[in-house]
Image (spheres, rainbow, N blue to C red):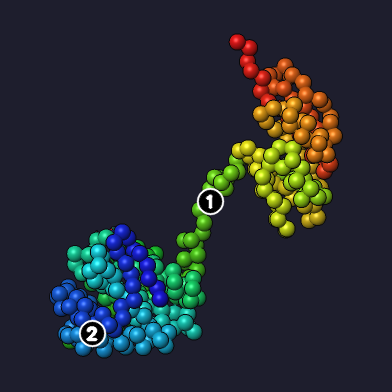
Amino acid sequence: MLTSTLQDGAELRALEPWRAGEFAAYVERHRAHLAPWLPWATSITDADGARRWLQAYADRQAADTGRIYGIWLDGVLVGGALFRVFDADAGVCEIGVWLAPDAQGRGLVTKAAQTMIDWAIRERGIARVEWHTVPDDVRSRAVARRLGMTCDGVLREAFELNGTRHDVEVWSLLATDLQIDLEPEKTSQPPTGYHTVTPRMVVGDAAGAVRFLGAAFGATGDAPDGRPAETRIGDSVIMVTQAGVREPFPALLYVYVADADATYRDALAAGAASIEEPMDTPYGDRRAMVRDPYGNVFQIAHRLAAPA
Ligand SMILES: CC(C)(COP(=O)(O)OP(=O)(O)OC[C@H]1O[C@@H](n2cnc3c(N)ncnc32)[C@H](O)[C@@H]1OP(=O)(O)O)[C@@H](O)C(=O)NCCC(=O)NCCS
């Protein structure tokens, strides 16, 4: 069942036959507002009539040919929406909506229709969502436009209501339209833990390299099959990739640690070969240099306190 929070305090839920009394009272309260546009607002005059109408929709839901929902605001039924037509085989459905006058102007049916469109297209594979409205129904047309629909054309005098024939505008939204709208926004923001530049090494033994990083630098992370390991040292991620698809490509990494001498010793104990023993550099770092068994070179450094 499609149930959705539309806004704070507003919910879209199935409008089932057991709610006939509540629905009949709603129609009674808002008949003058709804009847100029919706034939059922005239024909439903009591709970029995409401139950028959809701039962017909329950039957259509069971047959997957229609659905009806209510919109509740702070527990009060204020409106609704339906799939008047739902034809999964043909890939076409039609949505209709209504609201009590005092629930208008908050975007409730726009959000409800967006929820239904999303469900119809993404979960049910519907290709075309239709919206039928008489041209005079300015608010209904505004919702269609807000939903990104296109007016396909007018069915001349296709709709008889209260003894008058009305033109019907047919608006539609295609699944392909939606895909354009839903194209993910581009962002230069890297994933959590990554910086703009991320070091990556491609090695013959990714699991061994990850173990080495753990033993020498206290790195965390493992080496999952088929994906680069995301190994973390301090605030940085190092991607470790198993050679195969890509040629081996070692890294040269400059790593700041708390104590370069201690980390240098840990690195040698973990299998690294010394390239340079720790020494004080003229640029204020105490720094050593090692090569691990996988070809990667590490310059291991800590900052020297500035002279007082
Ligand atoms: C058609 C009907 C459901 C439209 O109701 P609505 O309140 O205009 O539609 P929404 O719930 O989408 O609200 C849109 C309004 O809320 C505003 N709004 C506020 N927050 C919003 C949000 N987060 N998202 C969208 N709109 C928002 C919009 O600006 C718009 O305001 P406006 O009326 O000043 O232009 C209503 O007028 C109605 O029940 N009419 C009688 C029955 C009917 O005609 N049904 C359609 C038959 S086809």
**What residue type is disc 1 on?**
Lys
Find residue 150 and report its image quarter.
Answer: bottom left
**Position of residue 196 measured from the top left corner of the image (x, y, whole percent):** 60, 40
Q: Determine crowd level at label 1: few under 14, some 14-19, many 20+ residues with C-alpha closer than 10 A.
A: few
Q: Is residue 195 left or right of residue 99?
A: right
Residue 101 versus residue 25 in the image, above or below: above
Q: Is residue 72 visible?
A: yes
Quadrant containing ligand 1: bottom left
Q: Quadrant of the C terminus?
A: top right
Residue 98 percent coordinates (x, y): 26, 72
Label placed on residue 32: none
Instruction: Identify the residue shown where x is 61% and y is 38%.
Output: 235
**Ligand 1 within 8 Å of the CB at mark 2:** no
Q: Check disc 1 and report its element: helix, strand or loop.
A: loop
Say which amino acid is labelled 2: Ala
Q: Secondary structure at mark 2?
A: helix
Residue indicated by mark 1: 186
> What residue is shown with label 2?
50
* Quarter of the image where one finds residue 50: bottom left
Could you tell me how far apart the alpha carbons at marks 1 and 2 are, in whole angstroms? 48 Å
